[in-house]
C-alpha cells in the first residue's frame, strides 16, 4: 500500500509542480501535449517507490521496539514503520523534495548541483525541454485552428473583442490591453490570450466577434 500511495501522490504533485508555474493558464494543453510531462511525473513516482523500498529494506529493520513512542525523529520513523498508509503519504508529499535535495553547487557557468539533484537533473532537464516543445506545439495547433476560423474578420474588430473581454477588476488589465493591441494578426492575438487567460476565456472572447 505504501508504494502505491507514495507513487500516486508524487505523480500528481509532480504534474502540479510543472503545470502551476509558467503553464498555469494552459495546464489542460500541458496534460494533453504529449508524453514528456507524464514521463517526468512517472520518473519522480518511481523514485518515491525506491525511497519506500529503501525505508522498508534498510531503515525499518534497524528500528526496535524501544524506538516506538519516543518524541524524536527515531520515534517518528518507528511510527511510519507501523503505519504503511502514513509512510506512503509522507514519502508522496516530501519525496520529490528529497529527490531534488541539493547540498551545494559547483561554481561553474551553469552552477551544477551536488546532492541527489546531481542524479535527478540528468533526467529532469531533458524532459523539461521536451515538455516545453510539446506544450508549445499543442498550444500553437489550437491557436492556428481558432485563427483559421476567424481569418475573414478584421484584426481591429478582433482586438476590440478581446480588449472588451478583459475583466475590469483584472490586476494587470492595462498592460494586458496594451499587449492585445500590439497583435498584428489573429494567431498572435489568440496566443497572447491563451497565455494570459487560458482556453475557456479565449473561446468566449472569440464568440464576441
Image (cartoon, rainbow, N blue to C red):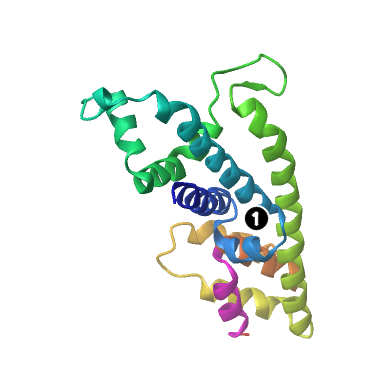
Above or below, 75 against 127 in this view is above
Instruction: Return the residue found at the far top.
Output: 107
Q: Nearer the viewer, residue 171 or 194?
A: 194
Residue at point 65%, 15% (across, down): 106
Classify residue 158 as left or right of residue 12.
right
Quarter assignment of residue 110: top right
Residue at point 21%, 26% (across, down): 71
Classify residue 59 as left or right of residue 116.
left
Using the rendered image of the protein, determine whether residue 48 is visible from the camera's viewpoint.
Answer: yes
Classify residue 155 as left or right of residue 93.
right
Residue at point 47%, 47% (across, down): 6
Above or below, 55 against 102 in this view is below
Q: Which residues are magenta?
A: 197-208
Residue position marked by numbered label 1 in the rendering: 38
Residue count near mark 1 (Cα–Cα under 10 Å), binned few <14, some 14–19, many ≥20: some
Classify residue 92 as left or right of residue 24.
left
In which quadrant will I find the C terminus?
A: bottom right
Q: Nearer the viewer, residue 3 or 24?
A: 3
- State the image coordinates of residue 30 (x, y, percent, origin top left): 64, 60
Q: Nearer the viewer, residue 56 or 16?
A: 56
- State the image coordinates of residue 26 (x, y, percent, origin top left): 60, 62
Quarter assignment of residue 99: top right
Above or below, 185 against 89 in this view is below
Amino acid at each position: 500500500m505504501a508504494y502505491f500511495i507514495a507513487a500516486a501522490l508524487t505523480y500528481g504533485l509532480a504534474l502540479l509542480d510543472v503545470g502551476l508555474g509558467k503553464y498555469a493558464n494552459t495546464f489542460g494543453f500541458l496534460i494533453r501535449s504529449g508524453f514528456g510531462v507524464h514521463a517526468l511525473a512517472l520518473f519522480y513516482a518511481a523514485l518515491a517507490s525506491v525511497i519506500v523500498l529503501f525505508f522498508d529494506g534498510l531503515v525499518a529493520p534497524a528500528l526496535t521496539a524501544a524506538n516506538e513512542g519516543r518524541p524524536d525523529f527515531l520515534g517518528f520513523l518507528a511510527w511510519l514503520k507501523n503505519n504503511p498508509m502514513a509512510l506512503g503519504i509522507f514519502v508522496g508529499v516530501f519525496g520529490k523534495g528529497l529527490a531534488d535535495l541539493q547540498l551545494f553547487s559547483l561554481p561553474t557557468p551553469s552552477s551544477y548541483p551536488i546532492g541527489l539533484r546531481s542524479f535527478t537533473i540528468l533526467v529532469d532537464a531533458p524532459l523539461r525541454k521536451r515538455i516545453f516543445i510539446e506544450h508549445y506545439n499543442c498550444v500553437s495547433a489550437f491557436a492556428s485552428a481558432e485563427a483559421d476560423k476567424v481569418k475573414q474578420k478584421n484584426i481591429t474588430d478582433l482586438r476590440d473583442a478581446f480588449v472588451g473581454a478583459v475583466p475590469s477588476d483584472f490586476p494587470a488589465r492595462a498592460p494586458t490591453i496594451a499587449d492585445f493591441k500590439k497583435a498584428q494578426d489573429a494567431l498572435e492575438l489568440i496566443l497572447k490570450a491563451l497565455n494570459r487567460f487560458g482556453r475557456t476565456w479565449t473561446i468566449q472572447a472569440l464568440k464576441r466577434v
